[in-house]
Amino acid sequence: MKRRKFLEAVLAVFPAATLSFKSVPEATETKSTWRRAQASLPLREKVRILLELQKQDLPLIRKQRALRSWEKPWPIEP
């Protein structure tokens, strides 16, 4: 019941949301399919995606606080 109330609240705030109670299993299946596809990618592609996500994340962290020494990106751009 709590989950239903939560979803109703989300839909009230975001009326354009495409979530419905019937689409939750479909969304779960879509997520599973996406995860299987990501897992089957070659290592080089996984690393490329990781580095791209880090490039997007670091400016957000940098706005909140100074980066720790282990968080600073390596200069890998040619």
Image: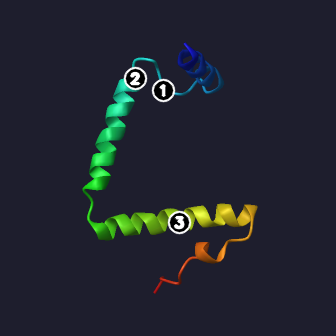
User: Residue at the location (47% across, 66% down)?
Assistant: 52
Q: Which mark is residue 54?
A: 3
Residue labelled with disc 1: 18
User: Residue at the location (44% across, 65% down)?
Assistant: 50
Q: Nearer the viewer, mark 1 or mark 2?
A: 2
Q: CA distance from mark 1 to mark 3?
A: 29 Å
Q: CA distance from mark 3 to mark 2?
A: 31 Å
Circle 3 SS class:
helix
**Observer-nearest residue: 50 or 3?**
3
Please say if the residues under marks 1 and 2 sit with CB atoms less than 8 Å apart.
yes
Circle 1 SS class:
loop
Residue farthest along the bottom direction in this orientation: 78
Q: Which mark is residue 39?
A: none
Residue 54, x across and y down, in percent: 53, 66
Circle 2 SS class:
loop
* Left or right relative to 58: residue 20: left
User: Residue at the location (56% across, 77% down)?
Assistant: 73
Residue 53, x across and y down, in percent: 50, 62
- Sequence-wise, which precedes: disc 1 or disc 3? 1
The total number of labels drawn is 3
User: Dividing the picture into quarters, in which one does residue 40 lie?
Assistant: bottom left
- Sequence-wise, which precedes: disc 1 or disc 2? 1
Where does the N terminus fall, quadrant-wise?
top right
Q: CA distance from mark 1 to mark 2?
A: 8 Å
Residue labelled with disc 2: 23
Residue 37, x across and y down, in percent: 27, 50
How dense is the environment of label 1, judged by Cα within 10 Å: few (below 14), some, or many (20 and up)? few
**Observer-nearest residue: 71 or 18?**
71
Give the amino acid type for the residue marked by disc 3 in the picture: Gln
Give the amino acid type for the residue marked by disc 2 in the picture: Ser
